[in-house]
Image (tube, helix red, strand yellow):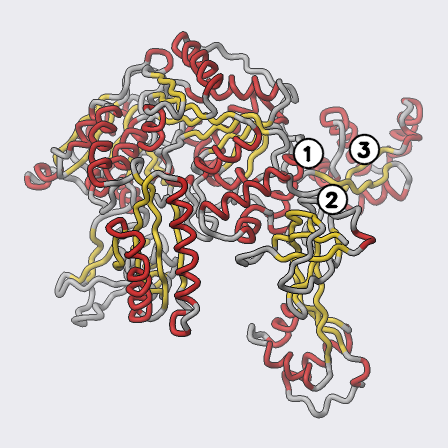
Amino acid sequence: MKFADVILPLALPKNYTYSVPPEMEDAVQVGSRVAVQLGKQKKYTGIVKAVHGMAPLEYKTKPLLDVLDKDPVVYPNQILLWQWLASYYMCTEGEVLNAALPAHLKLSSETLLLFNDAFGDDFTGLDDSEYLIAEALHIRKELRIEEVQLILDKSDVYSVIKKLIEKNVLLVYEELKEVYKEKKENYVQLHEHYAAEEQLAGLFNELGKAPKQMELLLAYLHLLKTQGSVLQSELLKKSGASAAQLKGLVDKNVVWIEKRTVDRVPGGGKSDAQVDFVLSPAQEKALAELHHCFESKQVTLLHGVTSSGKTQLYMKLIEEHVNSGKQVLYLLPEIALTAQIIRRLQKHFGKKIGIYHSRFSNNERVEIWNKVKTGELQIVLGARSSLLLPFRDLGLIILDEEHDASFKQQDPAPRYHARDSAIYYAGLFGAKVLLGSATPALESYFNAQQGKYGLVELTERFGGVAMPAIEIIDLKKEQAEKTMQENFTPQLRNAIGVSLADSKQVILFQNRRGYAPFLMCTTCGWIPNCKNCDVSLTYHRNQDKLQCHYCGTRYPYVHTCAACGSSNTLIPKNFGTEKIEDDLIQVFPKARIARMDMDAVRNKDSHNKMIQLLEQQGIDILVGTQMVVKGLDFDNVNLIGILSADSLLSFPDFRVNERAFQLMEQVAGRAGRRDGQGKVIIQASNTRHPILHFVTTHDYKGMYASEIAERQRFGYPPFYRLLKITLKHKQQQVVEQAAHILSNWLRPHIGANLVGPAAPLVGRVRTYYLQEMLIKLPRDTKVIAQTKQLLREHFTKLQAEKQYRSVLIVPDVDPV
């Protein structure tokens, strides 16, 4: 008898083992999807992790219900990655599966309600709600829960269903439904009879009295010649004809309609891989050093200043691996970056490259998944989730802007870091990892300095372009002298004016979206806060709403102070990107101004359209948050303005100086990338902050030396590993008690390396009160593993107590 260990899409501590019916033994493979039953009625789709001959001793196995795939949907290396992610990041393999598999590859267990014919058609004993459902079931014979909700016009229908079950009116049937559907399109085909020129000429004569059908035929022949195939929708659009007129040609047996399966994400460009640009001498030297490093190191860090041509080196390495038959994963921290880089890569790699990120539909994700699995896509460009795709033969992983915190998943689990996970995943294939950045993470640069990683440095910009000149403006002085206009110093206003006069473009950076971070009553100082979170509400003037940026709840604008009752005394305080955009319209009324933040670019294609507009010089001034910082390349931008450096330097976190340097250096790097030296103006109140000195001199190594000494002194990464524990509950007293008990259990084992518990800066989010603890762990694999096991045991112990059963415990390994 064979048994299969199955990973279910649930947060279960262990995987269930199921017996394999004899008729399924040949079909069950590691990585295949199987349908299984859990409990009395629920059915799930799981992934087979292992097939063996050992029956579990603790429980009697249930049989597999079905094998859903002829070929596995994941490879063994993926399952090994899932196992490592679950172990290292303290979650379950089911949670990893949920994150990895596209939704349409996970069958949905939908409750199907069937009419019980034995009940008959006498519904006199039913109330109004029961009658409506019984009548609908009697007519249609089956309904789904969502259909019952529509009939009753309410979401809470389970009590009604329960009564109907008790009265034997209906039966419940659990059904697994395959959600993914291939996309079908109608293509128009000319009948073979008219393939010969003589027959076609005769057809033209025949259609002389039907001008619309003649136009349809001419449009068809043009599209056939230019495109090779003719889509029905394109033919009707080009010819201006109606579907009825096309049907006339079908009825005359001139053309016929064929329904074909098409790709939702078609490839583009040529099918061969050829990089035809010439590297500079500095790039040639760096490429040779990369090859040398990869001979002895699995991981190499490419530290190249902004606009040094790192992307061209990536493309040379991609070309080498693709031509040797390997797959390449090119990871970027933001979806916004994929739009610009994909156009550059498609010029050289065409149909071999695809994009993968969260903005794609579920059907599109399934198709990309399958293309990667079969090897049809050799290059994948994407955000961190693309690491979970089923690569067949991975040869190289590139992490561009490797320092970026967006590579770390926050919620939900698995809370993995794409950089560290990529290194493990590459090791399973014997693949290489290239980390690239102008401002590497301190941990990465430390590993390179220690010899764990290879290190290659590019210290000059491509084409000999000078690094941008940086000027620090004292906000306190300008405000005292009352020279400010809106939020712009005279120096910044004048510089913007000069750039516009020279037909150059400007980027202004402010790391807050919305119009104002908060409103405040001028009479008593009251500030409107979110009802669900302990945080002030951001004012969005375009929508005339107040919004919580933690839970997303929106509130109407407040005209009356809730504390003192004063009317019209609430004024916006501080400023976000919306306010900057409004101010620019007042100061530079003739300029074409656009905004790039999470509010302005919500749609799948909106990033791409905005970037293309800037590239085509359809925008004079772009205002943005971090979206404008990360790796974007624009020829005509010569001025960058950082409107409030103090907000970057005042966050209470041990990484604040590193992050502020990275943000300012990266945004400065958008200036003067082609011709002439760019300029950066930084407005700051604390002009003597040491980080501003490092930014003005572009001195990464100076910043690194300063920060690494502080990290070693106070026991922070890279000298120690961090593990953050967050406890959540809707009652403040309960979560505080639970955190206190847990810390008392842990302290004898961990000692002074346990910090907390304490409420974080924002102590309540989405109605849950929070308590946090931080554990500092020495870089010892054995100690780290023992500590994680200790934590798992104590988490279970705490939640075994009735009063703390509902406390949520969230472990976050290597928080950023």
User: Which amino acid, mark 1?
Assistant: Thr
User: Which amino acid, mark 2?
Assistant: Lys
Q: Which residue is mark 2?
A: 184
> What SS does tag 1 mark?
helix
Counting residues from the N terminus, which is met first, the one under dot 3 or under dot 1? 3
Q: Which residue is mark 3?
A: 217
The image shows residue 342 at horizontal and vertical percentages of 52, 29
The image shows residue 574 at horizontal and vertical percentages of 21, 49
* Label disc, if present, on residue 767 of the rendered structure: none
Determine the residue located farthest toward the left in the rendered image. 481
In-front residue for pair 624/62: 62
Q: Which residue is mark 1?
A: 374
Question: What crowding class fits label 3: few (fewer than 14 Cα within 10 Å), some (14-19), or many (20 or more)?
Answer: many
Spatial separation of the CA atoms under disc 3 and disc 2: 23 Å
Q: Quadrant of residue 162?
A: bottom right
> What SS does tag 2 mark?
strand
Look at discs 3 and 1 and give the one toward the viewer. Answer: 1
Is 553 placed left or right of 273 in the picture?
left
The image shows residue 676 at horizontal and vertical percentages of 30, 15
In-front residue for pair 246/406: 406
Spatial separation of the CA atoms under disc 3 and disc 1: 39 Å
Q: Quadrant of the N terminus?
A: bottom right
Q: What residue is rendered at 67% in x and 43% in y?
A: 73
The image shows residue 480 at horizontal and vertical percentages of 6, 41
